[in-house]
Structures are given as structure tokens and as C-alpha cells.
């Protein structure tokens, strides 16, 4: 089966039980469950089980002798929580400790990042996106010459 490419930007509101909806267009990717863990830049990262295993395996292959890679593996694996399925409304429950890590209060933006989704505090995402937009051309040039 071909892996779906997860893309797009979606705004949601966290409910009183710390649940958010997974965007309808992306739900099929999480039919076998969803792992949520700490992401980079103070967001949360959510993976389908197969993708989360692949993510950890890639880090393990590179990390046997590198303490920084091992630290990144611990960063992702230690905080991960697994939910076997989305609820009937396509929602996932986010643990308070992960919400605190990401600074998520109520307004949330979910973005597709190819093999996973990221869950951002909406204000934090807007600030980060603004910075990305300002630096995109310079970053593309820098990567093209390295």
C-alpha cells in the first residue's frame, strides 16, 4: 500500500477534554492508530504507527555512536503516547504534558508535513510561518549551494 502524503494547514479549537479533530482529508492515514509526541520548534508531531516506527528506526540506525542522535531518539520516544483509533468524530486526545510542552492553550493549527502532522499553538504557528516566509528564498539559495 502506498503511503499517503500528508499536506495542508487546518485550524481547530481544543475542546474541554483536550481533544482536537484530525483533518478529515488526513484521517485515513491514521486508521491503525496515532502516535503523538514532542516535535521540534515546540510543536507536537503525530504519526501513523508504521511511520512512527520508521521514524524511530531511522534515528536508531544513525544513533549507535552519536550521543546527539540518541538524545533526539529519546526526545521523541519517551514522550510518545499511542491512541489505537480516533474517536467517532475523528478526534485525538492530547495529554496535558504534551500541550504544556507545545504551549497549546485552545486555538490550534494542524499542518501536514509529508509523513506526519504537526500540531501547533495557532499564534506560535503564525509567528513561525511569518519567519519562514521571510527566510524562504535565502534558505533555498543556501541549501542549493551546500
Image (cartoon, helix red, strand yellow):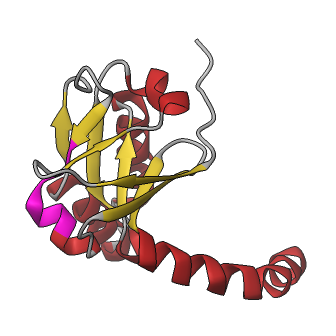
Looking at the image, is 61 positioned above or below residue 54? Answer: below
Quadrant of the rendered structure where residue 53 is? top left
Segment tinted magenta in the rendering = 93-99
Image quarter hosting the C terminus:
bottom right
Q: Nearer the viewer, residue 98 or 55?
A: 98
Say which residue appears at 18% left-offset and 32% top-offset: 83
Is 85 left or right of 136, judged from the image as shown?
left
Q: Where is residue 1 in the image (x, y as percent from the top left)?
A: 58, 11
Q: Residue furthest top?
A: 1
Q: Which of 126 and 101 is in front in this view?
A: 126
Quadrant of the rendered structure where residue 63 is? bottom left
Say which residue appears at 60% left-offset and 44% top-offset: 114
Say which residue appears at 12% left-offset and 52% top-offset: 16
Is 138 left or right of 16, judged from the image as shown?
right
Say which residue appears at 33% left-offset and 67% top-offset: 72
Q: Position of residue 64 (x, y in %)?
A: 33, 59
Q: Where is residue 130 in the image (x, y as percent from the top left)?
A: 64, 83
Q: Where is residue 119 in the image (x, y as percent from the top left)?
A: 39, 57
Is 17 left or right of 75, judged from the image as shown?
left
Q: Which of 62 and 129 is in front in this view?
A: 129
Looking at the image, is 82 positioned above or below residue 65? Answer: above
Looking at the image, is 19 positioned above or below residue 75? Answer: above
Q: How many marks?
A: 0
Looking at the image, is 124 positioned above or below residue 59? Answer: below
Amino acid at each position: 500500500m502506498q503511503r499517503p502524503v500528508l499536506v495542508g494547514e487546518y485550524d481547530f479549537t481544543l475542546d474541554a477534554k483536550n481533544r482536537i479533530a484530525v483533518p478529515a482529508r488526513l484521517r485515513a492515514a491514521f486508521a491503525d492508530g496515532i502516535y503523538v509526541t514532542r516535535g521540534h520548534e515546540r510543536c507536537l508531531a503525530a504519526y501513523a504507527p508504521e511511520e512512527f516506527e520508521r521514524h524511530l528506526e531511522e534515528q536508531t540506525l544513525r544513533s549507535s555512536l552519536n550521543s546527539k542522535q540518541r538524545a533526539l531518539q529519546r526526545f521523541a520516544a519517551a514522550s510518545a503516547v499511542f491512541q489505537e483509533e480516533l474517536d467517532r468524530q475523528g478526534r485525538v486526545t492530547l495529554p496535558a504534558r504534551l500541550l504544556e510542552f507545545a504551549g497549546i492553550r485552545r486555538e490550534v493549527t494542524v499542518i501536514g508535513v509529508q509523513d506526519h502532522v504537526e500540531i501547533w499553538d495557532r499564534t506560535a504557528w503564525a509567528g513561525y510561518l511569518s519567519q519562514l516566509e521571510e527566510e524562504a528564498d535565502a534558505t533555498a539559495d543556501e541549501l542549493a549551494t551546500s
